[in-house]
Every structure is written in structure tokens, then in C-alpha cells.
Amino acid sequence: MTKAYLGLGSNLGDRRQFLAGALRALAADPARVIVRGSSVYESKPFGVTDQPDFLNLVAEIETTHTPPALLAACLGIEAGLGRERRERWGPRVIDLDVLLFGNLAWNGPDLVLPHPGLSERNFVLTPLAEIAPDLEVNGQRVRDLAARAGTAGLNRVGPWADLAAVAGLTRERPATNPVPAP
């Protein structure tokens, strides 16, 4: 299995329920094991700023998928939860981004790894630094990237354990898909 990190975000409807639904869908496939997740953060929108604030988190998973298959699974989960792609960086009920896939550098037509915006976006770096501070991205530790990005516009709104409980993911889940609290 390969370790990967996914960024999850929602800014429409019941944001917490959309995040929980995405986590349930991720955990439903034995090719993806949720290892742990960050706290949930509320953040100001990026790109198109005239829209509601987001709830964001980062999940660490292990997967047997290839990078394109993981992306396809994430896009399928988004579609299943009702995401409509109308505007780049526009409002959305759910967004799942493949941030990192092992140590792989990938430059395909639909997927670039590490995620090209990762090193500038505090709404991804802060939660990623919470669960993997010593992870290196392009030769730099995540904790250092997060410190440089700062926390302006970010507000921690809840722990991983609370969202994992809403999603029905607990320590009591079968060993094939453990979801421990950080």
C-alpha cells in the first residue's frame, strides 16, 4: 500500500455532513484505508473570494490505487455527493484533492503531484502539518512550509475524532480500516 494525503473541503450546505460523507465513501473501499486525519479548520475561500467560508481537513490514507485511479475515485465521491463543477475555485459541496502520493512526482494531464498549490495554501498546510509535520514536500518540511504560510483566515473548529464519529469511523472499525484519533 502507498501512503497518500488528501485535502477535503466544503463550503455549501451542511459542510460537516459533506466532509463526513466523503470520509465514509473513502473508507467504503478496501483499496483505501484511512489512517488518520487532521482537525477541521474553517478558512476563507481561495481564488474566488465572494463565497461562503470552507471547512477543510487533511486525511492520511494508505491505498493500492495508482495515482490516476485514486483521482478517479475522489472525483466519483465528489459526484456521488452532488458536486457540480461550474466555476474554477467556486463554491462546492465537496472537494477532494490528491495532495501527495508517497514520494511520487507526477505530471499528467489531469493530476500533478505534489499538488501544485500545496506549498502556498495555509488551509492545506496547517492541517497537514498537524498530522505529518516532518513530511517533506519538494525538499522542505511541511512544518516549515506551514509556518511560512501562516494561519491568517484559519480557525480550528473541531478535532478529527468528532468528525470521524459523525462519519461513523471509530477505533472499533475492523483492522482493515483503522481510523485512530491523532
Image (spheres, rainbow, N blue to C red):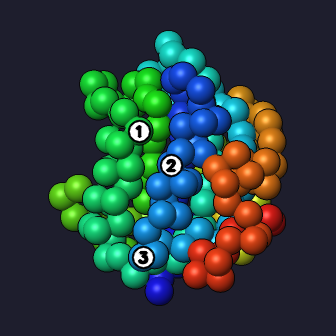
Q: Position of residue 49 (x, y in %)?
A: 51, 19
What residue does disc 2 label? 22
User: Which quarter of the rendering shows the C terminus?
Assistant: bottom right
Q: CA distance from mark 2 to mark 1?
A: 8 Å
Q: Which residue is nearer to you in this view: 19 or 151?
A: 19
Q: Nearer the viewer, residue 27 or 60?
A: 27
SS assignment at label 3: loop
Give the residue number, with chain letter if any, for mark 1. 81
Category of crowding for the residue at label 1, using alpha-carbon neighbours closer than 10 angstroms: few (below 14), some (14–19), many (at least 20): some
172 vs 91, left or right, is right
Q: Are marks 2 and 1 in contact (CB under 8 Å)?
A: yes
Q: Quadrant of residue 53?
A: top right
Residue at figure coordinates x 42%, y 76% from the top left? 31
How far across and how far down the image is residue 121, in percent?
57, 44
- Amino acid type, label 3: Ala
Vertical placement of 62 versus 23: above or below?
below
Residue assigned mark 3: 31
Residue at position x 59%, y 31% from top? 15
For marks 3 and 2, give the CA distance: 15 Å
